[in-house]
Image: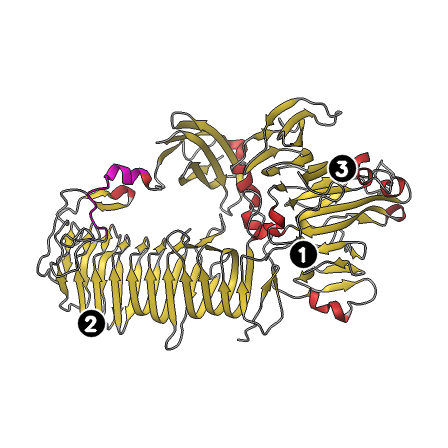
Amino acid sequence: MNRLIFVIIAGCFCLPGVVERANAQRPRCYSYLSNIEHTPQNDIIWWTRADSVWGTVRSNDLIGLDGIPFLGPYARFITSRQFSLRQGQIPDSLLYRFYGNVAPENFPARISSSVRAAAMPFISDRGGRMMTWIRLVGDAGLRIYQYPLGMIPRESLVWDQGPPLMQSIYIDGQVEIEGTLTGILTIGSSGNMWLIDNVKYSGSNPRTGYFGDETWDEAGAMHMLGLVSERNIIIKNNWRNGKEDGWNTAPNDFNRHSIAINAVLVALGESFTFEQQNDDWDMYQGPTPDERGTVFIKGALFQQRRGWLHRDNHQSTGYKLSLRFDNRLSSWPPPYLSGLFARSLVGSYDRLELTGGTYNVSYVVVRHLTIAADSELILDGPSALTITENLFVNGTAEHPVIFRTLPGIGHLSLVRVGPAGWQSVTSLQHAQFRDGIEFTAITDSLNLNCSTFPASVILEGRIFIDSCRFAGRLDGRSWREFHLSRSILTDGLRLGGRIQDGAIVNNTIVSASYNGVQIEGRDNNLRLVNNIIAFNRRGVYSVAGQDLSLTYNDVFDNWWGDYVDCAPGAGSISADPRFADIDRSDYRLLRGSPCINAGDPTSPPDPDGSRADIGALVFDPTMSVRKYIDDMDFIDDMDIRISPNPFNRTAQIWVKSQRAGLVQAVIYDTRGSEIWHAREWAQNGEVVFRLDKEDLNTAGVYLAQINCGRASRTTKVAFIP
């Protein structure tokens, strides 16, 4: 297989020949992203020489160029197809700024769900009867009005507040927006979003909306806005936005002929475009020409399908585009929009270094990968990441490296290392795998420290594991060394190969549906010392029937036997270890546990100087169990009951939480698409939602996700008409 080596700069893939480094200290984001560059009638929407771009333009479709736009520093155009030139050609001096036939980019189709889920306020259009009007009034905050759709706007106040800070507002319907923002805010809507005048930050240029000095922090600019529509974002045709040839009628009055926008614009359903384009079928007909001015954007623009901003109608209708990327977005996006600005990794690499921040990873193959602390990898696809030789994950306790998947993808993702050659290394420090991600590593030397794994793990090589947590089965195979210490396993350990030197010391192995420890190889020197092995199908099972060194273990209450084809050694006990709360996965030892100070006397003492305890977690007499339980982030912090289930007309979703707070219920179909949601404040920790057949329409099984504070539960609900 041929491998290409890319540098990742400004969110793009560049020419072969340079070692790759994805660095969070410089912008690695798109100023523009689209899936489609054609109209529904398959007409190309051209970029023209009148446009101006500072940043990276990225599309999954063919990009049409009617002349070359003005390109600011670091500007470039990237397409997953090719470029179509209406006339002339790209000058040789600019070829390095145009990249074709790169791998497709994932358009962020699910981004509105997080905006909607966190919304405060959440405002309804009352069955399509009302238009919502949001006025941003600078240091005075914002005001929200509603008036009957199709009527003249009037001030009927429904919400009034001071400057927002990390806030989300969601309008279930259409919304009009204007004004000056002081604060940090994201506005989402299920219907069209209309821009009826400038939408700017306090302190930006009053004519263009530009601010900062094009540095990574934009000279310390503080305000941030996201505008997310599940349909279109449309520039209203009014006098303030250049109606009826505003550019030529009032060339010196920017407030009369142009619109300045400081925001991240996201048109999920269709396009960012303008109203009344002088089409022959439109009742409105403007003058000839109808040049309305310039659209100044300092931020970023994402749209499903590119919309018209300029037409040939009436000899010339619409706007020029001046697009400048807000460099802060690579590390500080608007609230709940971080997924938009993850650096995207696709394809093959030789050596890749990730130096912090968020990365979208889709079918990546890399020979040597290094990941720095405070990095987050979002895996898109069942085999999103394959490392063929060396992997170094260098997280810390305060800043771990996180691997997770996109919500609702409906399958497990896999991180695979190897098979690799002699002297290949896999080292994980403070790595957190989430969302059912599986991990497989076949390598010469493998070190796992202080890491968590929610699904099955398969390891082969010289294996050293310390202070890890495995929720799925751990399968290990080695012909040399295997060392497992201070770890918690809740689906058992299966060990094969021919181990020359091995030790399983001070682990807690509990609640496995299969066997606690299953030894399949013939091991010359494998010791099991100071382990709790309890409540599994079998405790210790020696498949080959060999003698094992089993000393000072607590092997207790395993269904089909504590020792199968093996026998306990010196110091072993069989007694209830007395965990703090096994139902909540709290495996700390209660005072009076038989495992306290019962380990091998020759083992290193516990931190307090006492004899070693049995198990992974050292007994701490200064920490009360109640406080420990209160500090944990449990997923089972609520009870859910759906009745009747299945249902054919109406069902009630009854939720009881141990804490008061905002309870949110979301229904997903089997494809992961959200089809219903509701929210209610549970003052006493209890709330009931009503689910009607009209909310679902189609018979089938759905997933109901309930969230309250840190607690989250998912269950199934069936609808039978």
Is 621 colored magenta in this rendering? yes
**How far is disc 3 from disc 2 in space, using C-alphas?**
76 Å
Instruction: Kindly identify which residue carries mark 1.
Output: 55
Q: Position of residue 643 (x, y in %)?
A: 40, 30
Residue at image location 40% in from the left, 72% down from the top: 419
Q: What mark, if any, has residue 15 been given in the picture? A: none
Q: Are marks 1 and 3 in contact (CB under 8 Å)?
A: no
Residue 608 placement (x, y as % from top left): 18, 51
Where residue 365 sits in the image (x, y, percent)? Answer: 50, 67
Q: Per the image, is 159 magenta?
A: no
Q: Are marks 2 and 1 in contact (CB under 8 Å)?
A: no
Q: Disc 2 marks which amino acid?
A: Arg
Nearer to the camera, 667 or 255: 255
Q: For the magenta stretch, what is the residue range?
A: 617-630
Spot the residue most to the bottom.
Answer: 422
Q: Position of residue 257 (x, y in %)?
A: 82, 40
Query: Which residue lies under the disc numbered 3?
Result: 236
Taking the view exactly as shown, the residue that stands out farthest to the top is 156
Point out the frontmost of discs 2 and 1: 1
Kind of residue indicated by mark 3: Lys
User: Which type of secondary structure does the marked residue at label 3 adopt?
Assistant: loop
Q: Quick check: 107 above or below 278? A: below
Q: Which mark is residue 522?
A: 2
Q: Nearer the viewer, mark 1 or mark 3?
A: 1
Q: Quadrant of residue 711?
A: top left
Q: Secondary structure at mark 1?
A: loop
Q: Earlier in the sequence, mark 3 or mark 2?
A: 3
